[in-house]
Amino acid sequence: MENKNVGLLIVGIAVVMIILILIFNNVVRTTIGLSCSHGPECGMYNAVNVQTWISLAIIGVIIVIGLVIMFSKPREKIIIKKIKEKRRKINLDNLDKDEKKVVKLLEEENGAIFQRTLMEKLEIGKVGMTRLLDKLEAKQIIERKRRGMNNIVVLKNS
């Protein structure tokens, strides 16, 4: 259900409860009037008044909750669709041995890996890794995507 419908339902139930409280209050007052010998000075009238106000206050809180729910914005659903794409076959003939290692690692990691992880696995320094990835990017085999302070190296699809 949408928030608006839930809020309307809660407010509707609260209105029905108010009507029931008022009917019950009227019946209790009539019964007290018939049974109490003190007349309007009877202490039971005060007890009924207190109970009625407490009940109406609780119903007021329920109505406020219903209104808040009714006018609050529903949460948006985030839908993530995974699209399976065919990866092109990468020609490894014109690549040097380090470039081939990068491509093989990327294929093992489903086409994406953090640059730092790649550096650690290949045991290459930061500068060497940057130059190696620059060459592969120039050959349009990989691309680097910035993720905060990190880069993700991704095999390009064609």
Image: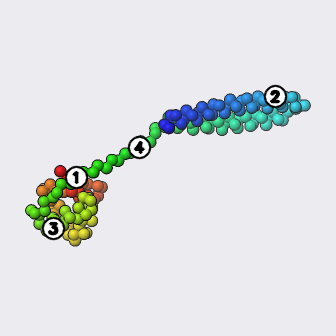
Contact? badges 2 and 3 (CB < 8 Å): no
What SS does tag 2 mark? helix
* Of the two numbered discs 2 and 1 in the rendering, the one whose residue sits closer to the viewer: 1
Q: Earlier in the sequence, mark 2 or mark 3?
A: 2
Q: Residues within 10 Å of mark 1 (few under 14, many from 20)?
A: few
Type of the residue with mark 4: Lys
Task: Give the residue displayed 50% in from the left and 34% down from the top.
Answer: 4
Q: Earlier in the sequence, mark 2 or mark 4?
A: 2
Q: Earlier in the sequence, mark 1 or mark 4?
A: 4
Tell me the distance, in whole angstroms, between the alpha carbons under discs 2 and 1. 81 Å
Q: Return the x and y of residue 40 as percentages of the image width and height.
A: 84, 28
Whether 100 is drawn above or below 81: the answer is below
Q: Return the x and y of residue 130 as percentages of the image width and height.
A: 18, 62
Type of the residue with mark 2: Thr
Given the current orientation, which residue lies at the most extreme left position?
Answer: 94
Task: Give the residue displayed 61% in from the left and 37% down from the top.
Answer: 62
Check residue 30 in the rendering and tell me which mark sits there, or answer none. Answer: 2
Q: Return the x and y of residue 63 as percentages of the image width and height.
A: 60, 35
Type of the residue with mark 3: Asp
Q: Which residue is mark 4?
A: 77
Tell me the distance, in whole angstroms, between the alpha carbons under discs 3 and 4. 43 Å
Check residue 98 in the rendering and tell me which mark sits there, or answer none. Answer: 3
Location of residue 138 by image quarter: bottom left
What SS does tag 1 mark? loop
Q: Earlier in the sequence, mark 3 or mark 4?
A: 4
* Of the two numbered discs 1 and 3 in the rendering, the one whose residue sits closer to the viewer: 1
Task: Give the residue displayed 90% in from the left and 31% down from the top.
Answer: 37
